[in-house]
Amino acid sequence: MIEILKKIFGITPKADLGELVREGAIILDVRTKGEFASGHIRGAINIPVEKLAGNLNKLKGKNIPIITCCASGSRSASAKGILTSHGFTNVHNGGAWMSLRRKIDIY
């Protein structure tokens, strides 16, 4: 019964974001260009959330792990929704970029 409820509500175990990065996940920073320029995770791709739907071709493939991030986690959640609605299957909301950077040990 619990497993059925988890499927209905989309509850899955939390991914190890650090492990995903070590295995080649894309870090997608969806803040503005100015915010990104003021500091970001090394190697992250910057596509502002409002331009994401028109720039999906900049991402490697729909099955590659993608971790979205922004300033607080709100825009990264929106970005995850955009990506999944366009068929991306392995998307994780990393939340705030500074917090994500600590979680994945990249400086």
Image (cartoon, rainbow, N blue to C red):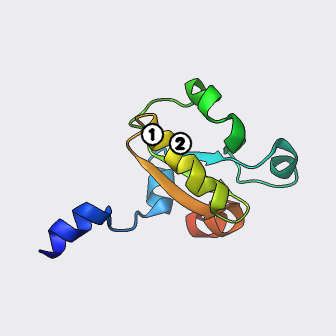
As drawn, is 15 to the left or to the right of 1? right
Label placed on residue 85: 1
**Quadrant of the rendered image containing residue 104:** bottom right
For label 2, the crowd category at 10 Å Cα-Cα, with few meaning under 14, some 14 to 19 and many 20 or more, is some
**Distance CA(mark 1)–CA(mark 2):** 5 Å
* Image location of residue 92, percent across then percent down: 48, 55
Residue that lies at the very extreme toward the left in this rendered image:
1
Instruction: Residue under label 2, please give it.
Output: 82
Q: Are marks 1 and 2 in contact (CB under 8 Å)?
A: yes
Q: Residue at left 45%, top 30%?
A: 61
Picture quadrant where residue 105 is located: bottom right
**Which residue type does callout 2 highlight?**
Ile
Rendered location of residue 63, percent (x, y): 38, 36
Residue 47 seen from this side? no
Q: Is 67 drawn above or below residue 62 in the view shown?
A: below
Specify the quadrant that holds the N terminus: bottom left
Percent coordinates x, y for residue 5 in the rendering: 21, 70
